[in-house]
Amino acid sequence: MNSRGDNPSVLLRRSGVRWRIFFLLLLLVSINYVDRASLSVALPVISAEFHLSAAQQGFLLSAFFWTYCAMQIPGGLLADWLKPRLMITAAAIIWGLFQCLGAGATSTAVLAFSRLGLGAAEGPVYPSASKLNAVWMPFKERGRGAALLDGGAPLGAAFGSVIIAALISALGSWRLAFLIAGLGTIACGALAWWYIRDTPQAHPSVNEAECAYIIEGQRDEYAEPTDHPVTNKQIFSSPSIWLMFVGWICCNTVWVGLLSWMPSYLANTQKLNISAVGGFSFIIFLSGFVGEIVGGSVLDFLIRRNVSRGIACRIVFGISAVIATTALFTVAYLHDITAIVVVLAIALFFTRWSNLYWAVPTMLVASEKVGLVGGSMNFGATAFNAITTILIGFIIRETGSYFYALMFFAMAGLLLLVCSLCIRYRPIRGDGNSAIVANLDSKFSS
């Protein structure tokens, strides 16, 4: 790094557009999760109206994930081809329209169709935003970039729980609550088109100092010169890529399990009304948002202090997996509502540290491949989530308890720990022969 990145006088002159873009992405993803979590929050009311069993609820919750999963790889490829600004804007407007459609559902089939459309439209958002992280952020800021990108998930779930529950209580209608959420999404999509650009050079508000800082900060000291650009075959032959995929599946299993089933768990085991469920869910999910920002700051702090990328990631992901898994085991044996909320808040606080996996594709592949790799990573996770939401519904129905569901999530946390420790956080080399960066015996050398 030259003196440009360390001179305080230069720092003061930077325009800071990259942070405003990522705060806008935080808002967009937050609204994404307000829409996504709206069904979970309203599910007790919707289930009563449509007379749904636990298994039927599981199928309805899973509808979103099937199309969301199907759009991950196409969405990543489109982000690489059509550019992320267009993809993010189109996605937001279309998923807002489907949320409005859900508000008018007169049957379970129509509601399921709206969830299928919601999933398809939201699919390209994360791969596109991950590509923006690769293009807009220097390496030492990508942890916080990933935290802002994905921090909207618990923030949206937190405020979504309160907002949707409050709207349902105030308006006496889950339909009006869905309609308001959908219209807000469409407005945010228009805002994204107005402000986001695909590169720093294309943004009218980026000054020369910020542009130079970003370009300089993207020179990867871990990369080794090669005359052979890495191919897709080489990328998908890398053990680190597959470990990343499995680790992200495990992380997402814990998160989606809590997002989908926690409101029902609180309502059914503690006999709470919808307002109380919304309030407790807000506390738990807000803890997840704070945890994600803290985790991103810790990762960037370690990298700025010259801790190697591999060790820094293993520290952050290791702490996340160990504490979250312990908390999930513990909550299965608790009965007091206060203790349950506190332990679930701890579990989500540390679980969200592992959502910094969205920074890992930017460490392993060049920016022109980040959309594809990020989409592929999320494809596996969402495919598994679609099955998991149904499986958990059957487990609850057959056992009459949430105990084994919590054990399932805790085991996913253990596997997350193993995968996170085994990834080699270095760029995959296109040497013309193999994409295996190094064998697993040397994985801890980075």
Image (cartoon, helix red, strand yellow):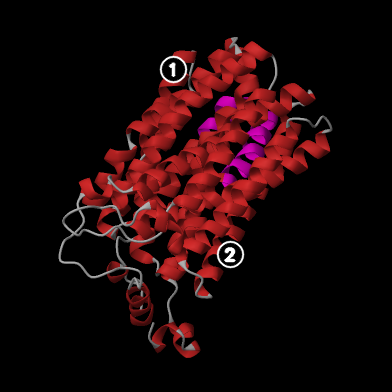
How many other residues sit within 10 Å of disc 2, few (<14), some (14-19) or many (≥20)?
A: some
Where residue 339 sits, quadrant-wise, is top right
Where residue 330 sits, quadrant-wise, is top right
User: Residue sitting at 81 percent across and 34 percent down?
Assistant: 337
Residue 163 belongs to the span the image colors magenta: yes
Instruction: Say which amino acid is labelled 1.
Output: Val
Q: Nearer the viewer, residue 158 or 213?
A: 213
Residue 24 belongs to the span the image colors magenta: no
Looking at the image, can residue 194 be seen?
no
Numbered tag placed on residue 298 in the rendering: 2
How many other residues sit within 10 Å of disc 1, few (<14), some (14-19) or many (≥20)?
A: some
Helix, strand or loop at label 2? It is: helix
- Using the image, determine if residue 110 lies above or below residue 84: above
Quadrant of the image containing the N terminus:
bottom left
The magenta span reads 154-179
Quadrant of the image containing the C terminus:
bottom left
Q: How far apart are the two marked residues, 2 and 1, measured between alpha carbons?
A: 44 Å
Q: Looking at the picture, how far across and down is residue 37, in whole percent?
A: 56, 34
Instruction: Say which amino acid is labelled 2.
Output: Val
Q: Residue at label 1?
A: 110
Locate residue 429 relative to residue 13 in the image: left or right: left
Q: Nearer the viewer, residue 96 or 440?
A: 440
Q: Looking at the picture, how far across and down is residue 65, in whole percent?
A: 43, 29
